[in-house]
Amino acid sequence: MPRFVTGDSLGNIKSLTYPVSGKKTELAVLSEGPKNSEDFQRPIPIQALAVDYKPESTVVAAAYGDGSASTYSLKGNTLTQLHHWKENRVKANQKYVGMSIASQGIFTCTSNGALRMTPPSGTAAQAQAELRTALLPTRLYSWKLAADQETFAYGGDEVDLSLWNTEQAFQQPAMPPTAAVTKKRKRNTDLLPGEIWRAKNVSNDSLSLRQPIRVTSLAYLSTESPHHFLVGTQLGHLRRYDTRAARRPVADWIGIVKAGSVRAVEKGFSEHEAFVSDNSNSMFSVDLRTGRALYGYKGISGAVSSIAPSPTILASASLDRYFRLHSTVPPPSEIGQNSEDKGQILDKVYSKSIPTVIVWDGDIAAASSADASAGNEDDAVWDAMENVGEDNDDSDSELNDKKWRKV
């Protein structure tokens, strides 16, 4: 049974489990949100989640809207807090834009460029001694850590896609907040300490006007190579980058989203597959070879704010207060082919609070068993069907014999 971990606008952490046997999808509350503090009177939402699956105990990390963050141990539906800390560099109207669990610790990044690596365990004194911080450019919208943990990437408002070496980012002295942009809108082309590569803005438009940089979401396209990226923009562009080929995008696709900006992008588990949502109520499967939308999911009445692919199904969190589970169809093997199969909404679960983020728990064994169970159910359906074989052939031959006798 594939399971997803979710967060909402009230700070609740929930578990969403989809059974393949036809039973009802389970939505269980693992942890209730924190209470209002003196400096944060509003409900405290969850802004980022990360999960590190282990058979004995899964680790869940959550970042909250008041600047705090926690790690938990998840066993079954029991969530036990392991560590709690506060990012003091985040201020009002700033938020977490990325979170990831790595072997050396928990990585967090905020919209004002406060990068932090918190040790996974140990006493408070040890955690403070091993704590590592760095300062990145401000006005960030998205931050992602590579699967091999050696690099990370970010983008934002007038901050184009940038690739950094993780270790060097913490070794170099902190950069001033205005180092990335100089006066009179001149762009500094020199790489910052720890920065490996930085994208170059696309060419001017048809009126020879500079196009603004508004990176809203990004994703690594490969777990083996740190050079391929998919980026969504506020102007509705979907761009693919290869850092070895050029600083400008190798593909710039327009017109995929139906309304406004690209809200979320995620790489699928099939080859050449990605999923994209916009600020309206649309979510699509996109062929990364052509930038063409293969199919869309119907029946969504709110913007999809978070997408969680898994090997078997796709989960999404929407502003209409629904978690949805979707089937997926791989892109065609050859470019230009059309497939009659389309992804469908398998189930949806209503939430009393607005979902903000959803992630897959990473349990490969559960996904594999789900595939096997689905296959067994299909076999059972075929076995239950009446076999049209020799009996029908015999009856037909007897009927023919009678006809010939009458003649």
Image (cartoon, grey):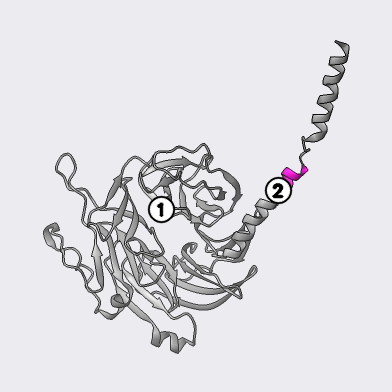
The relative height of residue 75 versus residue 379 in the rendered view (above or below) is: below
Residue type at mark 2: give it. Answer: Asp
Residue beneath the point at 50% across and 42% down? 297
Is the stretch drawn in magenta largely helix, strand or loop? helix
Residue type at mark 1: give it. Answer: Val
Q: Which residue is mark 1?
A: 265
Which segment did they paint magenta? 377-384
Residue 321 visible in this rendered orientation of the protein: yes
What percent of the width, then of the height, locates residue 281?
46, 43
What percent of the width, then of the height, locates residue 71?
51, 74
The answer to whether residue 319 is magenta is: no
Element on which disc 2 rests: helix
How dense is the environment of label 1, judged by Cα within 10 Å: few (below 14), some, or many (20 and up)?
many
Taking 127 as reference, is 188 left or right?
left
Numbered disc in front, either 1 or 2: 2
**Quadrant that contains the C terminus:** top right
What percent of the width, then of the height, locates residue 175?
23, 74
Taking 62 as reference, is 406 left or right?
right
Circle on res. 377: none
Element on which disc 1 rests: strand
Residue beneath the point at 26% across and 52% down? 249
**Quadrant that contains the N terminus:** bottom right
Taking 343 as reference, is 236 left or right?
left
The one of 350 and 325 positioned closer to us in this rendering = 325
The one of 224 and 74 positioned closer to us in this rendering = 224
Residue 24 visible in this rendered orientation of the protein: no
What percent of the width, then of the height, locates residue 251?
29, 48
Circle on res. 379: 2
